[in-house]
Image (cartoon, rainbow, N blue to C red):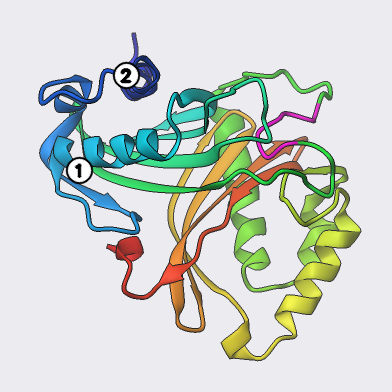
Amino acid sequence: MLESERRRQSVLGIYDALTAGRLHVESDVLDAIFRPDARHHGSPEPLRDGPAGARQLYLELQARLPGAVATVKRSVSDGDFVAVHWQASADPRDEFSGESWCEFFRFVDEQVAEHWQLHVAVPSSTVSGRSVFSDAYHGAYAAGDRNPATTAMNREIASAAFARFLEFDHAVVAEHWGEVYYQHNEMIPDGTEALRRSLEEVGGLPDEFRPHFTVLVTVAEGDLVWFLERVRLGDLTGLGVDIFRVVDRRIVEHWDIPALRPDSVDAGR
């Protein structure tokens, strides 16, 4: 097994253990995965370093959502990073229930040295009518194609487009988005016109009302490109995640987890 796949499978073991209720003991899968000095970012409350902080995070989830099942929706292993988008819900058949999580794990050798996480309550409805987890694009693209050349091209395209997107350059939509564009955001409908209008409106706001983004991590695999960002809006800061599907050099689908918390929160740690 390739090193990247070993790391992915190591991380995915967390969600199997969480679902099985095996994270309540002092020695469990987290001790094998996290270095003793692993740093955790993005929690509303400070977490201890190492396995103990991760254990605290997941046990708090289980206290909020008794009987929670962890259902992985998509994952990526790229270089030193593994990222996972997953649902925590007592009813995993209902994609409009529970919480939406995204986690980024940075490995040093075979253990996690740094960990970012953010999660939000799953909306009970979206303007598109589809969940924040589902896959909508079913084109001719070979799903699961992890050819390194394909991944590198899609990373380059999405990164260039997203950089302009974060500057609210609405012209980027016509240049880089597809004629078909599926949206999994709670409030934004499908299609490029709604996206273009949103960029134009937000870009025209005064600076204090306009969000500012700094990309912290970019990972890609096949047709999916993931961005972890630090977001600042006035006195609020937090982490955000955007995931784009790129097909034939165009962005055709998008998932995200927006999260803004007060400056006192450890989101940028």
Q: Nearer the viewer, mark 1 or mark 2?
A: 2
Looking at numbered disc 2 in the image, what kind of residue is underneath it?
Gly
Looking at this view, is 167 or 29 the one in front?
29
Q: Residues within 10 Å of mark 2 (few under 14, many from 20)?
A: some
- Name the residue: 52% across, 23% down: 71
- Name the residue: 42% across, 40% down: 64
Residue 136 in magenta? yes
Q: Quadrant of the C terminus?
A: bottom left
- Name the residue: 50% across, 28% down: 75
How many angstroms separate mark 1 from mark 2 (CA)?
17 Å
Image position, residue 209 (x, y; %): 62, 84
Looking at numbered disc 1 in the image, what kind of residue is underneath it?
Gly
Residue 7 in magenta? no
Numbered range of the magenta stretch: 131-137
Residue bearing the label numbered 2 = 21
Q: Is residue 96 left or right of residue 46?
A: right
**Residue 181 occupies quadrant:** top right
Is residue 57 shown above or below 170? above
Residue bearing the label numbered 1 = 53
Looking at this view, is 78 or 10 the one in front?
10
Image position, residue 141 (x, y; %): 76, 23
- Name the residue: 47% across, 41% down: 102
Predominant SS along the magenta part: loop
Looking at this view, is 62 or 199 the one in front?
62
